[in-house]
Amino acid sequence: MRTGIRFGRSAAIVGMVGAGLLALTAIPAQATTASSDCSARAYGPMCFYYHSSYTGARAGIVPAVDDLYSYTFSNTGDGAGKAVANDAGSGINDDSACAAQIWSHVNGTGTVLVLQRYGHVGDRNSTLGALNNNNRSLRWDCS
């Protein structure tokens, strides 16, 4: 009889420990659908397109972003609903005040591609070069 009680207590303890570990497991945050508004303006968006040559679904992102996996492409079109990170084929910096910095790794690290302010030479890239489908974070340079 004592053996049965010991086993019962052990199973209960294992169950509680397992539940506690499950509660500590990180659950990824829900991604935000980016705006489809890519109109040029001061402090406007960096507009990522799912395909090269500015086609497919788009994502207009205004703030600096540590990890573009937190955004998905919006509107209808090929790529809608997919993560922007490592899936952008082209882009236009629609911000008329700041240069966009697109980075290959999270938190503005790795290889960078700079797109100049909207309306200036170098404000767009039809393939994102080495960062085609290899874009992970976004920063702004307003100097």
Image (cartoon, helix red, strand yellow):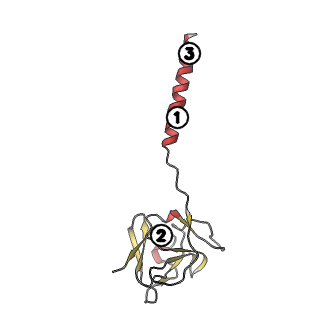
Look at 52% across and 40% down and name the residue there: 22
Amino acid type of disc 2? Asn
Residue receiving disc 3: 5
Considering every residue shown, the one lying at the far left of the view is 143
Query: What is the quadrant of the N terminus in the image?
Result: top right
In space, the residues marked 1 and 3 are separated at their CA atoms by 20 Å
What is the C-alpha distance between the residues marked 2 and 1?
Answer: 37 Å
Q: Residue at x 50, y 44 (%)?
A: 25
**Sequence-earlier tag: 1 or 3:** 3
User: Badge 1 is on which residue?
Assistant: 18
Tell me the amino acid under the disc marked 1. Answer: Gly
User: Crowdedness of circle 2 by 10 Å Cα count: few (<14), some, many (20+)?
Assistant: many
Find residue 67 and report its horizontal and vertical position in percent: 46, 63
Please state the horizontal and vertical placement of residue 126, each as a whole percent of the image: 52, 82
**Residue 74, picture quadrant:** bottom right
- How many neighbours does mark 3 have within 10 angstroms: few (below 14), some (14-19), or many (20 or more)? few
Viewport quadrant of the C terminus? bottom left
Q: Along the line of sight, which residue is nearer the eye, 106 or 31?
A: 31
Q: Amino acid at mark 3?
A: Ile
* Residue 118 higher or lower than 138, as above or below: below
- Nearer to us: label 3 or label 2: 3
Q: Which residue is mark 2?
A: 135
Element class at badge 3 = helix
- Single out the residue that lies furthest toward the front: 42
Give the total of numbered labels: 3
| Foreground disc of the pair 2, 1 | 1
